[in-house]
Amino acid sequence: MVSIDVSKLSNEYRLLLLRYVVKRYGRNRVLSILNISRSTLYRIEKGLVGLDDAKTRRLLGIVRPEELRDALGFKRLLEALGIVKPNGAINYSLIMEILKLASGDEYLKQLMIKLVLDNFREDVKKAIGLFPYNIVMHWDEGFEEFLTEHKKRRTVKDPETLKYYRNLFMKYLEGKELTPKLIDYVVNHRNKWLRNVFRHYISVPIL
């Protein structure tokens, strides 16, 4: 069941939810779930009778989380979840908690990074006024040890993978100065493994 405070769902949203469930699961299923007659369902669909909290919860009980956006629309779903208020204001404290949770998930973290790079690249460049210039990238024993022994998540144990990483690094990164221009080059490179090697390099605690 989707965790939504049904008391905050307007009659409009409840009706949208009902119509979606009727279309998705059929009238007979809805009649059974709500334990109502066809005439009552007709009156609810026409807006003559409202859906109370209990009936709304029953409908939510069969709707999968991924279906809610189709049922309510994305903006209405955000309002129902309390992320966006009806007047359009954003619940910043809730957003921050969501971001904290997302930062602990590797896949979501990568999505956030991609979102920032795709939409706010120039802002990020301006924000990094203290960008660490004069750092020249070199493959050395310390970086190799980091990959094989200390990298977060899975370390690189396969000699062939390590060799491939080294070849990529030597071809595209060796001797290059760490600058925003280089970051742009790596981010837009067609080889995703180059991005991985670069990300590992700049994550080393001490270069």
Image (cartoon, rainbow, N blue to C red):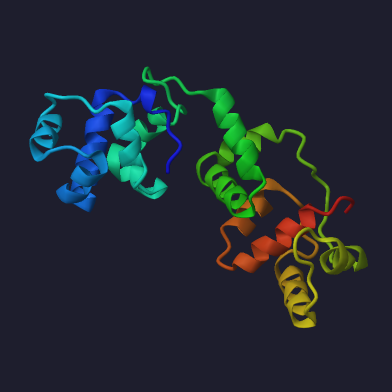
Q: Is residue 127 left or right of residue 2?
A: right
Pinpoint residue 37: horizontal percent, then vertical percent: 12, 38
Q: Quadrant of residue 175?
A: bottom right
- Pick the front one: 3 or 144: 3
Pinpoint residue 110: horizontal percent, then vertical percent: 60, 52
**Which residue is at a point 67% across and 46% down the rendered structure image?**
104
Q: Quadrant of residue 21?
A: top left
> Does the image show residue 48?
yes
- Pick the front one: 99 or 174: 99
Task: Give the farthest residue toward the bottom.
Answer: 160
- Pick the front one: 176 or 207: 207
Quarter of the image with the C terminus in it:
bottom right
**Which residue is at a point 59% across and 68% down the rendered structure image?**
191
Pinpoint residue 135: horizontal percent, then vertical percent: 83, 50
Pinpoint residue 66: horizontal percent, then vertical percent: 39, 49
Tell me: residue 94, above or below residue 186.
above
Q: Is residue 35 left or right of residue 116?
A: left
**Which residue is at a point 92% across and 68% down the rendered structure image?**
141
Looking at the image, how many numbered discs can be counted on the residues? 0
Quarter of the image with the N terminus in it:
top left
**Which residue is at a point 76% across and 59% down the rendered structure image?**
200
